[in-house]
Image: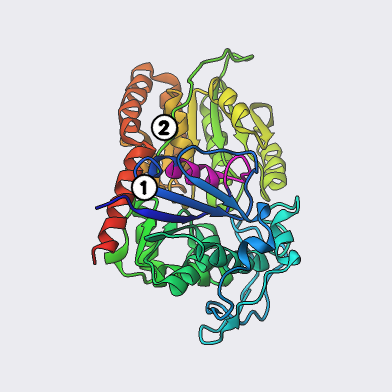
């Protein structure tokens, strides 16, 4: 098939990132751009960022004149009537005590009007993309991105995560081009089996309207089919890759082994289980320290619980760390622990493996499908996870065995490999 022209929709993009979504988008886009004609539209882009093999457009960098040249008679079709929506909504945090966030009709239509400065200012401000009226941002992004898309020539639309699904569906309706949606994480992961509400509705709607769904693991694919009732025949799991890093080792300022938890301190990531694991390990050996790197709504509770459990002198919180600081921490880490309750993939485990760090991870994670050599347990089985950590601390042969196997596992976990599989999905839906 000739060079495929791809319109990619993302929500965050380095260096303007909040979490792993932007990193994954950049990694895949750089690899795809080697083998396709790629255009990327995001809410915010660094105006100084330059990419040699694809075009990046941030709504924060455009003017009304750039988008008000499209035909005025196009009818905006998706989620036309918004009755109510949350104001302060974090899409990557468990939402408790809330039911309906947004009500919509799929029959009503809104005439495409000229975009105002107010609409564009939603993305030009210094406000975080996830703060303020997120519902309005998601809807306005879908309208503005559709206008931008109508000025481009492309064969397929690729929308990353629920925040861009509305835009993807609307562009599909406006152009007739096939839509691929990438499922990086789901509301089910964040809120469990009872997940319902605004985000869930958009996720389900986007996956139903898509021609293909790409979850980041088979595990996430089963969630799409089982909890969102998406046709399994249009689900194509593709694992994330990991960018090469310059690996180095640093000397610790203390003699004990260091066990690391790295991620947002939310219920989905299982930080409470890490604390319980630490307490279990410290019952058997004091020759170990635990570090929890990250921030989130569970931080205060964890600090108070840690002191109560008596692990305070062996348990450390770092708060948020940038990429450079994360690598410095990895350079002194002996064991990586990821007890996630529901982890679509778990890129940090691959990053730890690059630093020759053995991992103890939950079976409820996508990366468990890739890292065959990692030691695994159910997220709730803190006794088994503690046992794995103690064994790694005391058995040098086992430690090296896990490291060697992990090195083999990550050899195939590249963005180029992921891009080749994504291109096959494009070809599949274009040939139908």
Residue marked by disc 1: 36
Q: Is residue 413 above or below residue 421?
A: above
Instruction: Tell me if residue 20 is in the magenta stretch.
Output: yes
- In screen coordinates, is 289 left or right of 375? right
Q: Nearer the viewer, residue 328 or 292?
A: 328
Across the whole image, how many numbered discs are drawn on residues? 2
Residue 255 visible from this viewpoint = yes
- Comes first in the chain, label 2 or label 1: 1
Helix, strand or loop for disc 2: helix
Across and down, in percent, residue 290 comes to 59, 29
Q: Nearer the viewer, mark 2 or mark 1?
A: 1
Across and down, in percent, residue 3 comes to 31, 50
Across and down, in percent, residue 131 comes to 71, 57
Helix, strand or loop for disc 1: loop
Report the coloring of the rendering.
rainbow
Q: Which mark is residue 305?
A: none
Instruction: Say which residue appears at 50% left-offset and 58% top-offset.
Output: 161
Q: Nearer the viewer, residue 136 or 117?
A: 117
Across and down, in percent, residue 372 comes to 31, 36
Residue marked by disc 2: 388
Residue 387 visible from this viewpoint = no
Determine which quarter of the picture holds residue 314.
Answer: top right
Q: Nearer the viewer, residue 24 or 167?
A: 167
Q: Is residue 79 above or below residue 118?
A: below
Instruction: Say which residue appears at 71% left-offset and 37% top-offset.
Output: 307
Query: How far separated are the C-alphas under marks 2 and 1?
Result: 44 Å
Q: Are marks 2 and 1 in contact (CB under 8 Å)?
A: no
Q: Residues within 10 Å of mark 2 (few under 14, many from 20)?
A: some
The magenta span reads 13-29
- In screen coordinates, is 251 left or right of 245? right
């Amino acid at each position: 098939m000739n060079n495929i022209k791809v319109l990619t929709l993302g929500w965050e993009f380095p260096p303007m990132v909040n979490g792993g979504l932007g990193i994954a988008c950049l990694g895949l886009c750089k690899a795809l751009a080697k083998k396709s004609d790629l255009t990327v539209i995001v809410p915010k882009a660094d105006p100084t960022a330059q990419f040699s093999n694809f075009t990046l457009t941030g709504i924060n960098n455009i003017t009304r004149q750039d988008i008000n040249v499209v035909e005025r008679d196009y009818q905006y079709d998706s989620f036309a009537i918004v009755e109510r929506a949350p104001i302060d909504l974090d899409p990557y945090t468990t939402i408790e005590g809330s039911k309906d966030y947004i009500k919509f009709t799929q029959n009503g239509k809104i005439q495409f009007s000229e975009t105002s400065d107010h609409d564009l200012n939603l993305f030009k401000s210094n406000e975080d993309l996830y703060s303020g009226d997120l519902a309005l941002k998601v809807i306005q992004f879908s309208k503005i991105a559709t206008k931008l898309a109508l000025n481009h020539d492309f064969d397929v639309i690729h929308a990353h995560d629920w925040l861009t699904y509305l835009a993807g569906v609307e562009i599909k309706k406006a152009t007739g081009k096939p839509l691929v949606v990438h499922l990086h994480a789901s509301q089910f992961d964040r809120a469990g089996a009872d997940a319902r509400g605004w985000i869930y509705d958009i996720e389900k709607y986007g996956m139903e309207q898509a021609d293909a769904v790409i979850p980041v693991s088979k595990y996430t694919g089963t969630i799409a089919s089982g909890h969102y009732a998406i046709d399994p025949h249009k689900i194509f799991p593709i694992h994330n890759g990991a960018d090469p890093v310059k690996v180095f080792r640093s000397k610790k300022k203390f003699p004990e082994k260091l066990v690391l938890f790295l991620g947002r301190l939310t219920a989905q990531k299982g930080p409470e289980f890490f604390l319980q694991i630490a307490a279990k390990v410290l019952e058997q050996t004091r020759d170990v320290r635990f570090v929890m790197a990250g921030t989130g709504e569970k931080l205060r509770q964890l600090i108070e619980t840690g002191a109560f459990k008596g692990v305070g002198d062996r348990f450390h919180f770092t708060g948020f760390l940038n990429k450079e600081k994360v690598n410095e921490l990895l350079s002194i880490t002996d064991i990586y622990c990821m007890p996630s309750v529901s982890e679509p993939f778990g890129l940090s485990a691959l990053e730890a493996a690059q630093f020759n760090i053995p991992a103890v991870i939950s079976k409820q994670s996508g990366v468990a499908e890739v890292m065959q050599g990692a030691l695994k347990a159910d997220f709730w089985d803190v006794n088994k996870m503690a046992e794995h950590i103690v064994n790694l601390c005391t058995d040098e042969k086992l430690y090296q065995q896990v490291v060697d196997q992990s090195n083999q596992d990550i050899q195939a976990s590249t963005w180029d490999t992921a891009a080749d599989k994504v291109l096959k999905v494009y070809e599949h839906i274009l040939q139908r």
